[in-house]
Image (tube, rainbow, N blue to C red):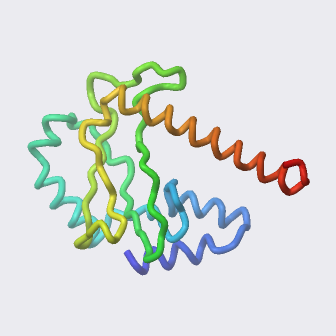
């Protein structure tokens, strides 16, 4: 993974159109990007071995949830360097659509599996998972309401700072 990250960072190091295009090929979207990378991986070597071992270990759980037509749609490694800020609590897959209606089908559309590649502790900013919130309308509604309040507060603070800078405060 280390050589893969170094190669990817070298290809996206400037602000050219080709670097921006390479960024999407090598990296996924991630919150709190400072010192944090969502590096897309190739299914080769040690990565392939870990995926096979994980799938074998989880075969009973996975076979109850997915059909033989299931596809691996993303294979990535989240890398967090020392000193990276913690990510705010968030969901990766929305449960509610844009108008607040439930957008869950009877069968799972996405299954995410986290595999820590080293021993982790809370001091390292480990990912916090909240069990069963992926299907909880109450959890998603509360999160969206809190996010709306946070955005409004940030916009009010920005406006107040602009006014203070102009001497209007």
Residue 20 higher or lower than 58, as above or below: below
Depth check: give the residue in front, 97 or 56. Answer: 97
Residue lying at 70% horizontally and 43% vertically, measured from the top left: 155
What is the number of callouts on the image?
0
Residue 127's spot in the image, x, y percent? Answer: 33, 58
Residue lying at 44% horizontally and 36% vertically, measured from the top left: 143
Residue lying at 12% horizontally and 47% vertically, measured from the top left: 59
Location of residue 95 by image quarter: top left
Q: Quadrant of the N terminus?
A: bottom left
Residue 89's spot in the image, x, y percent? Answer: 42, 49
Depth check: give the residue in front, 112 or 120. Answer: 120
Residue 11 higher or lower than 110, as above or below: below
Residue 47's spot in the image, x, y percent? Answer: 28, 67
Location of residue 53 by image quarter: bottom left
Left or right: residue 50 versus residue 82 is left
Left or right: residue 102 versus residue 159 is left
Residue lying at 23% horizontally and 60% vertically, measured from the top left: 51
Residue 100's spot in the image, x, y percent? Answer: 48, 21
């Amino acid at each position: 993974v280390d050589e893969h990250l170094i190669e990817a960072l070298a290809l996206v190091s400037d602000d050219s159109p080709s670097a921006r295009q390479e960024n999407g090929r090598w990296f996924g979207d991630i919150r709190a990007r400072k010192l944090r990378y969502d590096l897309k991986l190739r299914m080769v070597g040690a990565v392939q071995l870990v995926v096979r071992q994980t799938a074998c270990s989880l075969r009973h759980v996975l076979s109850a949830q997915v059909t033989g037509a299931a596809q691996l749609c993303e294979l990535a490694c989240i890398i967090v360097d020392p000193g990276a800020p913690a990510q705010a609590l968030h969901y990766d897959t929305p449960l509610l659509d844009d108008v607040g209606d439930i957008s869950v089908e009877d069968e799972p559309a996405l299954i995410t599996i986290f595999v820590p590649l080293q021993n982790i502790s809370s001091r390292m900013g480990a990912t916090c998972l909240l069990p069963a919130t992926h299907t909880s309308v109450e959890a998603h509604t509360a999160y969206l309401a809190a996010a709306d309040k946070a955005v409004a507060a940030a916009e009010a603070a920005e406006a107040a700072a602009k006014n203070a800078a102009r001497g209007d405060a």
